[in-house]
Amino acid sequence: MEQNRTALVTGGTGFIGSRLVEALVASGREVRCLVRATSNTAALEALGVECVVGDLRDAESLERACCGVVEVYHLAALLKAPWHPEFTAVTAEGCGRIAAACAAQETPPELVLVSSLAAAGPSLEGRDEERPAAPISRYGRAKLAGEEAARPYADRVPLTIIRPPLVFGEGDRSLLPVFRMAQRGVVIAPGKAPLSMIHVTDLVTCLIAAADRGERVGVGAKPARGVYFVADELPRQLGQLGTEIASALGSRPPRTIRLPLPALWAAAAASEAWGRLRGRPTLLNLDKVCEAGAPGWVCTAAKAREQLGFAPAPFGERLASTAAWYQAEGLL
Ligand SMILES: NC(=O)c1ccc[n+]([C@@H]2O[C@H](COP(=O)([O-])OP(=O)(O)OC[C@H]3O[C@@H](n4cnc5c(N)ncnc54)[C@H](OP(=O)(O)O)[C@@H]3O)[C@@H](O)[C@H]2O)c1
């Protein structure tokens, strides 16, 4: 590892970003994080990480944060609040701003942009990178717009785009309700759509591999160039996932009860209204129900396996470590 290899992480206080920061520090890199004035930076400071205060809406702060770094991992986004007035400015336009800040450096750093399977759109049989994107949710369209906003800088900035599916693992709360239902013996599932998933540790390994040796997006090249899906090999329906979680917890296999989509719409409408009232994102919102109605969210990680050496740990082990973390936190 070369000396003084500084990496910038945006979203370093978030679920995936905080695990990425830990891995980068463990790899011997110097790490800098773009944080907001309101961010809780205690965990980052404990790791000796440099925090630069800024915002994805503020181009000048991004240029400052990018100064002198050799790689940038862009994760910051507003995930659960597509109704938020700043949603597009942060989630979509923020990608263009960070790419512009990289391009403005004398030696532009490698930029790894964390997009989403939602940007590509649903698929039952398994999407690969060659298939044209067709997002169906506001979140997906914003993530695709973010990719498009960064692409014009690819003539100067070595850019790689990673599109993870549902990410789970230690530190996440989004999948906690499914773990709880599995433990209690009943999983309520809105449908039978198979879902690709990835554990956060496997994703983080892949992000670092992408910065080190990923294919780069090319201006005027095929849209698939420099883009990777990363996921465990087997997609799972929510009911199947509940059975595997129960097995990791040593509980009996749960029953699956189908939740009619209209009931989910009603619950999401109430949850979103509550979120808007409090000005806070909620796990369940109307945009998520749009996604839940799709026949499947499946992608194939063949390209990442071949080019990035992507080799996730056995899924059962990943569920077990996640369950152990929930238990240690008193959440299960
Ligand atoms: N979680 C998943 O299942 C999943 C799946 C596919 C793709 N992704 C993508 O992975 C990335 C990270 O997801 P996550 O689950 O780790 O998200 P998260 O836990 O919600 O973290 C979001 C991060 O973005 C930061 N942020 C929000 N608005 C900002 C702004 N205006 N300026 C600067 N920073 C801002 C937050 O900082 P504060 O601490 O200040 O709030 C936080 O660090 C996102 O790009 C997401 O789209 C996630």
Image (cartoon, rainbow, N blue to C red):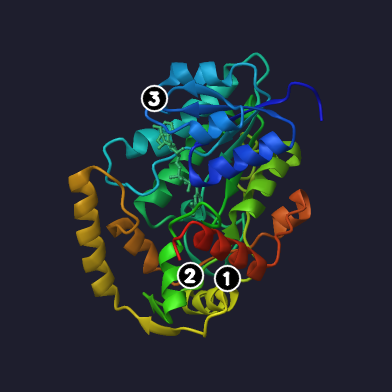
Kindly identify the residue that appears in the image at 57 percent across and 31 percent down: 46
Q: Residue at x 55, y 58 (%)?
A: 325
Q: Which mark is residue 37?
A: 3
Q: Residue furthest top?
A: 106
Question: Is label 2 in contact with label 1 (beta carbons under 8 Å)?
Answer: yes
Say which quadrant the N terminus sits in: top right
User: Vertically, is 143 above or below 316?
Assistant: above
Depth check, mark 3 against mark 1: the one in front is 3
Q: Is residue 97 left or right of residue 88?
A: right
- Residue 288 shown left or right of residue 300 in the figure: left
The kind of residue tagged 3 is Ala
Residue ID for mark 1: 235
Residue 228 percent location from the top left of the image: 64, 50
Q: Tell me where residue 47 appears, x and y as whole percent.
A: 61, 32
Mark 3 to mark 1 CA distance (whole Å): 39 Å
Q: Which residue is mark 2?
A: 296
Residue 190 in the image: above or below residue 118: below
Total marks shown come to 3
| Residue 160 visible (yes or no) | no
Mark 2, ligand 1, within 8 Å: the answer is no
Residue 7 seen in this snapshot: yes
Residue in the foreground of this view, choosing between 111 and 121 = 111
- Residue at 24% x, 66% y: name it: 267
